[in-house]
Amino acid sequence: MSGSMAVGNAVVVPALQGDTSASTPSKVQSIQAFGASVTKASVGERVGVLLKGPDLSAMSERGFLTAPRETTEGERGMTTVCDRVLGYLDPIPSFTYDMYSGQTFSVTAGHDTVQGTLTLLGYESEGPVFTQSRQDVNTQVSTLKDTLTRHMAEGKTMPKGDRMLAVLQLKAPLLLPLPLGQYPLLGARLELPPQAGQCRLAFTLTPIETPADLHDLPYRRLCTSTLSGHVLRRDKDGGPGLVVSGLFSDNTAASTAISSAKGGLACTILTSDGTERGQAVVVSAFGTSGKVKCTLTQGDAQPRDTVTVAQTLQHRIRY
């Protein structure tokens, strides 16, 4: 979740609280990164760790490896329960999938994991009010990954102005230790099928505060999410039916967007020079690649025309 680890460091496995062999720190004997021995690992890197001492057979599927806890008596036991977290998002460099507003992630704090919906608010340095397209957000997240990788390689921390502000709307209450800024949350896409070389850990989120409602946020206006695809083909008889690709990354994302849109998911048909040619409504998703069927409601549409869907803001945040 944060920090780094090196051979010889003392660590504990909190999940084995009942195991006397795990109640005292163990030393890291070796670290393996894709078959090669390394002496140190930082946040976001996938490695295997060999420990001396604890019996890990009693541990459940997931657990955490941490430094021995050192806290003052005043800090111990101080927690807060929240269902919404505002914080700084730092993407994990090994995560290669798209990341954008509206996605659901598994959010872990300590030993508890709940589902949470991510909303990207943009970079702290960009000013009080802004709108961003999904493509812009993905480009900036990719740039941030490169920046984060570079700073990790140089042993530096991320500049404050380069971090992205984000909100996690949790589907169940989560217990967070205090003070908030010292304990990052871990976001992951655990539902993705395991694949060789593909990391499912997406980001860490350093909490700033736990607002009771989105209207309490004094920081940013929520960015719009503009999806863009193109017309693949239309009905052979010239009917209103269209097949559109590129709007969504997969069938799940398409189905979620369609089901959550009140009154239908409207889209705009644009020519190659950006002139509006027509209007349509997304009807259904099919296949596994995110293709959708649309019905033309106004104007015309031709193959290779651009199709855009602007997801309107549910809340406008005052600066």
Image (tube, grey):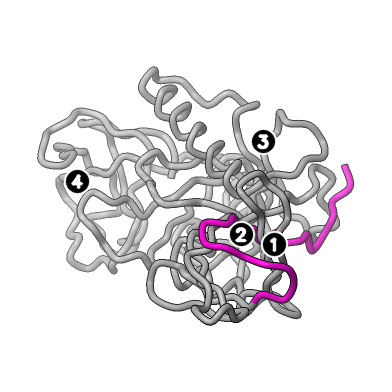
Q: Earlier in the sequence, mark 1 or mark 2?
A: 1
Q: Which residues are magenta?
A: 296-319
Tell me if mark 3 has few (under 14), some (14-19) or many (20+) residues whose alpha carbon lies within 10 angstroms of its own.
Answer: many
**Image depth: mark 1 or mark 3 in front:** 1
Between 97 and 56, the one lying in front of the other is 97
Which quarter of the image is occupied by the C terminus? Answer: top right
Q: Is residue 17 left or right of residue 20?
A: right
C-alpha gap between disc 1 and disc 3:
28 Å
Which quarter of the image is occupied by the N terminus? Answer: top left
Q: Is residue 199 left or right of residue 255?
A: left
Occupied quadrant, residue 92: top left
Three-letter code for the amino acid on which mark 3 is drawn: Tyr
Q: Which residue is labeled 3 in the image? A: 123
Q: Which residue is labeled 4 in the image? A: 48
C-alpha gap between disc 2 and disc 4:
45 Å
Q: Is residue 121 above or below residue 304?
A: above
Q: Earlier in the sequence, mark 1 or mark 3?
A: 3
Tell me if mark 1 has few (under 14), some (14-19) or many (20+) residues whose alpha carbon lies within 10 angstroms of its own.
Answer: many
Residue 270 placed where, x, y %?
66, 55
Three-letter code for the amino acid on which mark 1 is drawn: Thr
Q: Which residue is labeled 2 in the image? A: 307
C-alpha gap between disc 3 and disc 2:
27 Å
Q: Which type of secondary structure does the marked residue at label 2 adopt? A: strand
Three-letter code for the amino acid on which mark 2 is drawn: Val
